[in-house]
Amino acid sequence: MADIGRVRIRIPTSIKAGDVVKVRVLVIHPMEIVERKDGKPVDKNYHFINHVVVSYLDKEIAQFETTQSISENPFFAFAVKATEPGVLRVTFLDTHGGKYEGTADIKFS
Amino acid sequence: MLRGRVLTGIGLVLGGALVSGCAQRESQASGADLPSAPWVSRTIPEAAGTIAVQPDGARRALRYSGWTAEDFGRFRTYAYTETKSMVPLGTTPLPTVAGNAQNGRRLFLDRNRGPCTGCHLVRGEDVWPAGNVGPDLSSYGDRDAPPEYTFKLIYDSRHIFPESVMPPWGAAGIFTAPEIMDLVAFLATQKGPLPAEKDLERDPGTRGKPAGFGDNLDPTNNPAVVRAESADDLWAEKGPSGKACVDCHAGGPLASMKGVATRYPRYVPAHRRVMSIEDLLTVHGPATTGRPLLEESADNLELTVRIKMASNGMPVRLDLDLPENRAAFERGRASFFKRVGQRNHACADCHTVESGRGAGKFLGGRLLADVEQGLTRHFPTWRTSQADVWDMRKRMQWCMTPLGANMLAADSVEYAELELYLASFDQGKPISVPGIRH
Amino acid sequence: MTVPAGRRITRRNMLARGITHCEIFDARGSANRTMLGTSGVTRRKVLRTLAVLGGLGIVGSMPGAASVARAQGHLANLGPEEPVESTMKRLFGGRPIGDGASSITIDLPLIAENGAVVPVTVEWSGPMAPQRYVKSIYIVSDKNRRPLNAKFNLTPAVGLAYVGTNLRLGESTDVRAVIEMNDGTLLQAKRAVKVTVGGCGG
C-alpha cells in the first residue's frame, strides 16, 4: 500500500467566528490486525495508527489513542470551536514510527 | 496469457469469416453474428481463470488470494465455447433410514452448504441472517407433507417446480441422500404455535434495508477517491516506451477523458470485440506508453477509476443501435439468463424481480439488487469488506464461487458482453465512480 | 485535476466534481519518518526513492527512535484479549458508572453489512465549559477480543463532545460509549449492532 499516509480533511465551506464546526478526516493506512496461528495470536510489530493529535492555532486540542479495532484507512470525526482564523492540524502516528499530517485552513466568511 | 482452448474455437470461426470478408460489411447480420476476433488475455495471474493440473492429476483453480482453489470443471460456465449442459434432472430412491432432525438443523444452517437459511427463514433466535428469496419455512411442519415429497423437493426441486431457482441439492451432489433425510426430519419439527418475535431484524420480512456507506465521492469517506489520485501522477510519467499518457491526452485524466466512459462497454473495431475501459487499457497501454496495464492490476484499476471519474454526473450513453453492440447485448442477455455451475443459477435468479426470483429480497443478510435499476454506473467500487477497489469483472468472478462455477479470465469477451447487457440498464443515468459498497 | 498540497480546492471545481458544500484539503503526509518530509510526495516518487535508498542500504537501518518504535505494535503493547468486564475493570476500577442514556447519543447502524467498517458517532448533549467538560470518550465493543476500540481525549477548545470513527467488530455486539468528565464522573450508554456475516455477495 504505497499511498500510506495520504490525509484528507473536510470542514464546512462557510464558518463564522465562534461556530463549533464538525471536522472529518481520513488517512490511508493498513491498520494491520492480529494474525492467528493455531488459534493463538502471532507476535510481531503490527503496523497500525495508535495515536492521533489534533492541534488548532498551534495548541493541542484533542488527542486520540487508537487500536487495531479501528477500520483500515481510519476515519475520524470531531468538533472544533472556530475562535480565530488559523491552521487546524491532524497528525497520525503509527507503530512503525510513521508520522502523517494533514492541515486545513479555518477562515471566516 | 494465451488460453488455448478458446483460441482454437475462435480461430475456426475467424477462418470462416475471412473467406466471406467483403460480404461482412454489407450483410450486417453476419458481421454482427461474429463473436469476436482472437483475443489474447492480458490479466494478472490471479484473474486469468487458470486451472493447474497437479502431478497426481488433481486440479486446482488459481484465483485471488483467499478465494477457494476448488475446481468446478465438471459444471457449466459462461464460456461461449461451453459444451456442458446444466445440472441434469436427478432422482434417487428414498433412503430407508429415518433422518436425524438435530443434524438436519445443523445442515440447514451450515454456511459451507446452502446455507438453506440463505433463502429460508426457520425458527430460532440463533438464526441470523436468514433470507427470504424462498418461502418462510417456520411452519413447514404444519403442512404434514409426506417425507417423499419433501425429499424430492430438496433433492431436485425441478421435478415439482420446473422453473425453480432452488439449486438441485441432491442431483448436483451438494447434499447426500441421508443428509437430505436429516433435513426432511428437521423441517417436520417446524410446526405448532410460533414463538413471539423479539427481534424485528431477524425476520427478513421486517428487517430494515441496509444503510449504505454514505457519500461515495467524499474522499474523507471513500478511500478509493484518494487512491485514484495516483493515476494523475501515472498519467504524466513516461512509460517504458519513453512516452506518457499526457503526450496525447493533455491536461491529465479528469480534463482529457470527459465523457469517454459514458460510451463503454462498447464494440471496438480495432480489436473486434466489446471492451470496457479496463479491457481497452490492457491493449492501449502496451501500444503507447509500453506499460502492460494488465487487467485487475492496481494501475489498470486506478486508471479506470480516474477515467470514469472524468465522466461523473454524465449520463451513460451506450450506442445500442450499432449492430455489433446490439448483437453483443443479445449474447450478454443470453448469459444473464444462462444457468451455470453446481448451483445451477442464472444471474436472473437473484437479480430480477419476477416471481420466485430474488431482486429486492434478502439472500442471507444481503439485499439483492435489481438489474433494471442499473448496477454498473458506480463501478469500479470500493468494497469495505475487502478494503479494496473491485471492478465489474472481479465482481462477476466472485459470483462464480458461490455458484460453483469456474471463473473465466477477467478480460474475457463473455464477461464484457454480459457487462454491456447490464450497463444497458444504466443508460441515461449519471455515472458516479468510485462507488462505496459492502 | 491535481491540487498541490495545502492549496484550497475552489467551490466551483468541486461542484464540477459533484462535491458541494464542504471544502476539502488535500494534504500529502510524509510517507515515513525515514523518507522525504516535504509535502507533495507522491506514491510514484516514494517508490522510486525507496528503491534508491534500498540500494544504498539505508532503509531499515535507522538507529535510535526507530528501534523504540519497532516494539510498539507487539502483543505486549496491545493490551490483553479479555472479556469486556475485565476491560471495564482495568479502565475504571470500581468507580461508579452512571446511566448516560438521556445525554449520550450513539449513532450506529442496527445492522452492519460487515464487521470491517461500522460507522459510529458519539455525542454528549452538555456544554464543554472550562470548569466542566468531557475529558475522554471511550468506545468499547463488548464482544471484541480486545474490547476497547479507541479513547478520545478532548479539551474545552473542541466546543462539543462529539466524535466519530469506523469500528472493526468481530461479531454482533453491544457497543458502549463511556464518557469521563474532567471531575472524574463517568457516564455510559450503549447500542446493539448485528453484524451480517458472509453471503454470496462475499
Image (tube, rainbow, N blue to C red):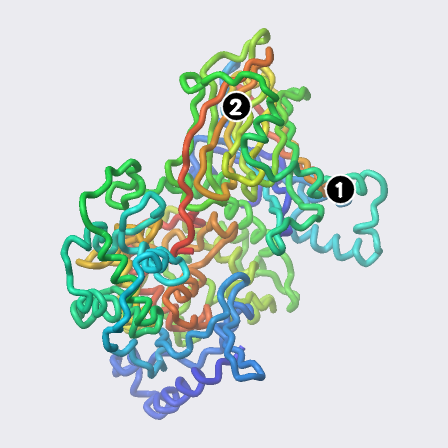
Along the viewing direction, whichever of B388 and C25 lies nearer the viewer: B388
> How many numbered marks appear?
2
Q: CA distance from mark 1 to mark 2?
A: 29 Å
Amino acid type at circle 2 is: Val
| Residue visible at 40% across and 66% down in the picture | B400
| Residue visible at 52% across and 41% down in the picture | C168
Amino acid type at circle 1 is: Ala
Are the residues tagged 1 and 2 within 8 Å (C-beta)?
Answer: no
Q: In the rendered image, which quarter is residue B180 located in?
A: bottom left
- Does residue B270 appear in this view? no
Q: Quadrant of the C terminus of chain C?
A: bottom left
Q: Position of residue B401 (x, y in %)?
A: 42, 65
Q: Which residue is mark 2?
A: C178
- Does residue B154 appear in this view? yes
Q: Which residue is mark 1?
A: C71
The secondary structure type at the circle numbered 1 is loop
Q: Residues within 10 Å of mark 2 (few under 14, many from 20)?
A: many
| Residue visible at 52% across and 14% down in the picture | A17
View extreme (top): residue: C131
Number of the label disc, if any, that sits on residue A61: none
Along the viewing direction, whichever of A33 and B392 lies nearer the viewer: A33
Q: Position of residue B371 (x, y in %)?
A: 28, 57
Q: Position of residue B346 (x, y in %)?
A: 29, 67
Q: Residues within 10 Å of mark 1 (few under 14, many from 20)?
A: some
Along the viewing direction, whichever of C118 and C172 lies nearer the viewer: C172
In the rendered view, tell whether residue B202 sits above or below residue B189.
above
| Residue visible at 65% across and 20% down in the picture | A57
Q: In the rendered image, which quarter is residue B22 located in?
A: bottom left
